[in-house]
Amino acid sequence: MPTPVSHPCPTGPLRLDGNGTNRLLTCRVLQSPLAGVSDGIFRGLVRRWAPEALLFTEMVNATALELGHGGAKMEALDQDPGPVGVQLFDHRPEAMAEAARRAEAAGAWLIDINMGCPVRKIARKGGGSGLLRQPDLALRIVAAVVAAVRLPVTVKTRLGWCGASADPVGFALALQNAGASALTLHGRTREQGFSGRADWGAIGQVKAALRIPLIANGDITNPEEALRCLAVTGADGVMVGRGSLGQPWLVGRIAAALAGRPLPPEPDSHARIALAREHLEALVAARGDQGLLIARKHLGWTCQGFAGAAQLRRELMVTPSLESALELLHRAELDISTPGPCPAGPGCR
């Protein structure tokens, strides 16, 4: 079981108010939107361990939607067995409002506005973390999206553009006043990217100033860290991002820890290979040859922690076909004499 903490975990459903609608989250662990990762197949794997968690589509570009691209990311959301949010990014309020209407019509559970993505090609066009340098525009976007839909509208953001100019409390209060139903705050500035440690203390200062829910994000890689983050920040929940790469069970394990339930066991080596095979076959069935290319990163993240894993990953990165990839996975499974932790030695990890 996770190490106990002095600050009790939040209990009960988390209420998110929309424009005439109310939504209740019964699971206070969220899976972050991840570009090129959090498609329906990945979400289905996460849902296996965390059936009630709020998951997100990949980021959707409002301009791309106008041009007829990106709509596939929002298909069949109303058929998902659990809540799915759509995260939008752009720098134009009217385009964001129209994209939000389309997401609502597609069955989105809520709309999230990305104000934290540090990728340069997005930020330099005014989207993602670029909005941290244009707070007035950021607030106009929130107001426009809130007015366009009945769903709750949330914002995912960072502490600021850089340390010298950051005013996370002031910006968060302004987003709240513009109509945001909740905020997710990553404990780094855009300047930091993903370097250094997330500043959970700063997240706690923002939480203390807000009346709307605050979700903490950054460096939450296991149940123990999730509990510690809540103890430090007093946040209403946590969002898991990069920690779930190759570990779709992580959200479910953290959810169990927050609820005081026994943690489901982490998959052993055989189960990891079986999961990698399932993910690979599903991506190829859905995307053909492109699915094989997409699968390579997932295979690399999942095939960890057993003898021969490093060599297996190298071979999977260049394998030319589904059949050859499946043969590599089959051989790796046969080579594992016993399931369990990785034995010491080179080539294991």
Image: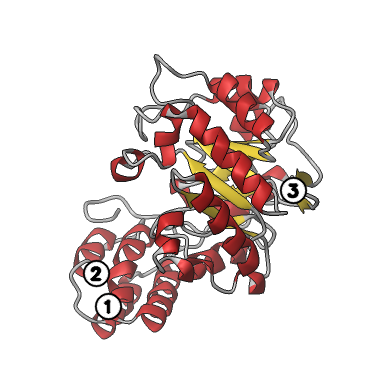
The location of residue 194, given as percent across then percent down, is 37, 35
Please give left or right for residue 31 compared with residue 313 in the image.
Answer: right
- Badge 3 crowding class, 10 Å Cα cut-off, few under 14, some 14 to 19, many 20 or more, is many
Give the foreground label among 3 and 1.
3
Are the two marked residues, 1 and 2, in contact with CB atoms closer than 8 angstroms?
yes
Where 110 sits versus 43, above or below?
A: above
**Earlier residue among tags 3 and 2:** 3
Label 1 crowding class (10 Å Cα cut-off): few <14, some 14-19, many 20+? many
- Give the Cα distance between marks 3 and 1: 46 Å
The amino acid at mark 3 is: Gly
Residue highlighted by disc 3: 18
Whether residue 134 is visible to the viewer of this picture, yes or no, is: yes
Going from the N terminus, do you reach mark 3 or mark 1 first?
A: 3
Rendered location of residue 334, percent (x, y): 33, 77
Measure the alpha-carbon separation of dots 3 and 2: 45 Å
Tell me where residue 77 appears, x and y as whole percent.
61, 69
From the image, tell me which residue sits under label 2: 316
Q: Which residue shows up at 36% across the image and 70% down it?
A: 337
Q: Which structural element holds mark 2?
A: helix
Q: Is residue 297 depicted above or below 81 in this figure?
A: above
The amino acid beneath tag 1 is Ala
> Is residue 61 visible from the viewing direction of this image?
no
Q: What is the distance, in whole Å, between disc 1 and disc 2 at their CAs?
A: 6 Å
Label 3 secondary element: loop
Find numbered disc 1 in the image and state the secondary structure of the residue it sits on: helix
